[in-house]
Image: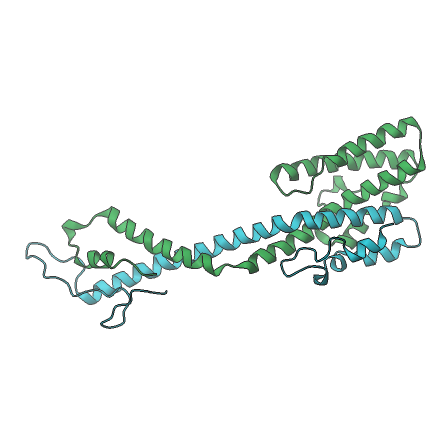
Chain colours: A cyan, B green
Amino acid sequence: MLCSRQGSQNGTCCKTPAPIESSDDNEDVWGSDEESIAVYADLKRAHGKQGYLDGLVNQQEASLQKGFDSGFPIGADLGRDVGRILARLHGTPAFKEAVEALNVSKVLDKKYFDDQLDLAHSNHPIISSYDR
Amino acid sequence: MCLHQSYAVKLTRTTMTDINLDTALEFENELYSQGYEEGKEAANNEQFLEGKIYGLQTGFQRFLIVGYMDGLLQEWRKDGHSKNIESHLNQLQKLLDKISNGNSDQSVADYERALSAARNKVRVIASITKTTDKIAGLDKMVQEVGGTLAVSSNPDDMW
């Protein structure tokens, strides 16, 4: 983990200072200074790591969902267009070729999209070629 | 980012009588939040684009059938039929108009309901107009063009 307030004396993040003498009446529950550091490090590992994982997973899920919601309507429009074309060509000699040309892998080919996966042109080249 | 030193200091100096559960929990929460933010930063545009590809494919697959039925409707209209067929065609049109491109829960529910009713209507019209060949191999064709996700696992939905 990054630390902007690195301890200057020995380079340890959030360095634990030497314990102040405790009163005789109270036993220091944290034991020696070394043990104190160990307890702190364990806490940081356990909670910081869990937080990191949760942050990573939640953000990934949120990003995935956002991407899905953004792509779905574009794909739906293209699928609808392809379905219309196929219904029109059904029973004609051009049908078989159209089934191949309008396959999902051809229509959604990366070359028709920009780097954010939006259509590079308002009209899809393959679909336009079938539109009367 | 760095933990507040005061927390670390407090922990090491705290004696049994000073232990405060709230302070300890707050400290743990802070460690957690710190990790959470770092994890969030690690998830980037890659996940967005990955989701977008999946959305594009799924949208394509689910709306092939909708477009195909709309295409059939237009073909049947061109052929010109009796008034009886006309009312069936209008009902099919209404069902297809209910299907929107969105991915909200409401849109998906509307899609499922309208699609199922539209399928039945298409079967009826195809039967009357003797054009059942248009829908005989439809599920196979949808699968071939759109990939496997488009095929319903419900046998009642098969043509």
The structure residue drawn at horizontal position 17% and vertical position 62%, both measured from the top left corner, is A31
The structure residue drawn at horizontal position 17% and vertical position 55%, both measured from the top left corner, is B14
Is B14 displayed left or right of A86 in the figure?
left
Q: Position of residue A13 (x, y in %)?
A: 29, 66
Q: Quadrant of residue B152?
A: top right
Against B84, is B30 above or below?
Answer: below
Q: Position of residue B137 (x, y in %)?
A: 84, 48
Against B123, is B58 above or below?
Answer: below
Name the residue nearer the viewer: B54 or A28. Answer: B54
Against B144, is B90 above or below?
Answer: above
Against B70, is B37 above or below?
Answer: below
The structure residue drawn at horizontal position 70% and vertical position 62%, both measured from the top left corner, is A110
Q: Residue furthest left?
A: A24
The structure residue drawn at horizontal position 24% and vertical position 59%, both measured from the top left corner, is B5
Q: Quadrant of residue B128?
A: top right
Tally of marks: 0
Answer yes or no: is residue B150 visible: no
Q: Position of residue A95 (x, y in %)?
A: 88, 53
Name the residue nearer the viewer: B99 or A43. Answer: B99
Q: Residue furthest bottom?
A: A10
Q: Position of residue A54 (x, y in %)?
A: 44, 54
Is B89 displayed left or right of B2 in the figure?
right
Is B75 displayed left or right of B2 in the figure?
right
Q: Residue furthest front?
A: A122
Answer yes or no: is residue A44 visible: yes
Quadrant into which the N terminus of chain A falls: bottom left
Is A90 displayed left or right of B156 in the figure?
right
